[in-house]
Image (cartoon, rainbow, N blue to C red):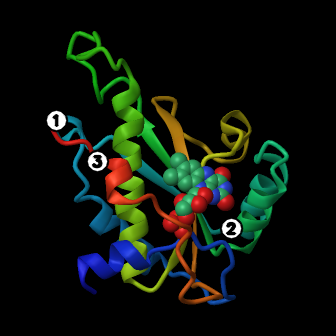
């Protein structure tokens, strides 16, 4: 798939077919996502993949801050990916000081780049995905064992899309986005 096609045709997919998503395919997607850039190549992003139906249901039912829309998406997906970052590395000096005025925000930045790379890789392999930002981090940690030194950055649901060729929500024009100096 051409990179332009992949970027333009990737959509947030929230309805999935019953077809299982194998660990092999998920690992292929993560293998591509590994090539996302990161702060000083620290590669702090981790992927906790939930395929067990009961854990997925518990998270859908109890960890979405009552946002039903996300509960439905998690229920429908074939795998729920909890994207985490190892804390206190990206954006930090070795002595623990922040490297820049943006403090710890580079951690989230790295997770964002990795997440989009993950979603593009998933799309290139015929998978649909959506990044979910509305979730209850503390409660998710009651259902899966996230290591102490990690924190959750985002959730990504994946599965084979039920609907193909979704039309992109409107985008701003280049002129609205760019300023040249
Ligand atoms: C940081 C972030 C958080 C998001 N959170 C949610 C969410 O909680 N639930 C959801 O259904 N979609 C969520 N989305 C998906 C956006 O709604 C979607 O990307 C946007 O509408 C553009 O559609 P597209 O991805 O198909 O181009 C999120 C996307 C991003 C990048």
Give the residue at x 62% y 90%. 19
| Residue at (47, 43) in percent of width and height | 84
Ligand 1 has an atom within 8 Å of the beta carbon of the residue at disc 2:
no
Q: Secondary structure at mark 1?
A: helix
The answer to whether the residues at label 2 and label 3 have Cβ atoms under 8 Å apart is no
Q: Which residue is mark 2?
A: 52
Q: Indicate the quadrant containing the C terminus: top left, top right, bottom left or bottom right.
A: top left
Mark 3 secondary-structure assignment: loop
State the separation of the CA atoms marked 1 and 3: 27 Å
Q: Please rate how many residues cluster around mark 1, counting C-alpha atoms within 10 Å: few if below 14, some from 14 to 19, many from 20.
A: few
| x and y percentages locating residue 15 in the rendered image | 69, 78
Q: Nearer the viewer, mark 2 or mark 1?
A: 1
Quadrant field for ligand 1: bottom right
Tell me if I can see residue 35 in this picture: yes
Above or below, comparing residue 154 to residue 138 in the picture: below
Q: Residue beneath label 1, please?
A: 40
Please tell me which of labels 1 and 3 falls first in the chain.
1
Q: Earlier in the sequence, mark 2 or mark 3?
A: 2
Rendered position, 172 above or below 143: below
Question: Where does label 3 land, which residue?
Answer: 178
Residue 32 falls in image quadrant: bottom left
């Amino acid at each position: 798939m051409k990179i332009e096609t992949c970027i333009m045709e990737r959509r947030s997919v929230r309805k999935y077919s019953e077809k299982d998503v194998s660990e092999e395919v998920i690992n292929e997607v993560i293998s591509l996502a590994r090539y996302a850039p990161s702060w000083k190549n620290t590669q702090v992003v981790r992927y906790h993949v939930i395929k067990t139906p009961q854990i997925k249901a518990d998270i859908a039912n109890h960890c979405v801050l009552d946002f039903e829309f996300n509960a439905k998406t998690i229920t429908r997906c074939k795998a729920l990916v909890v994207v985490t970052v190892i804390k206190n590395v990206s954006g930090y000096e070795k002595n623990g000081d922040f490297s820049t005025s943006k403090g710890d925000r580079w951690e989230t930045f790295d997770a964002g780049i990795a997440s989009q790379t993950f979603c593009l890789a998933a799309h290139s392999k015929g998978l649909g995905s959506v990044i979910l930002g509305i979730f209850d981090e503390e409660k998710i940690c009651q259902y899966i064992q996230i290591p102490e030194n990690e924190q959750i950055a985002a959730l990504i649901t994946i599965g084979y899309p039920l609907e193909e060729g979704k039309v992109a929500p409107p985008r701003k024009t280049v002129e609205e986005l760019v300023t040249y100096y």
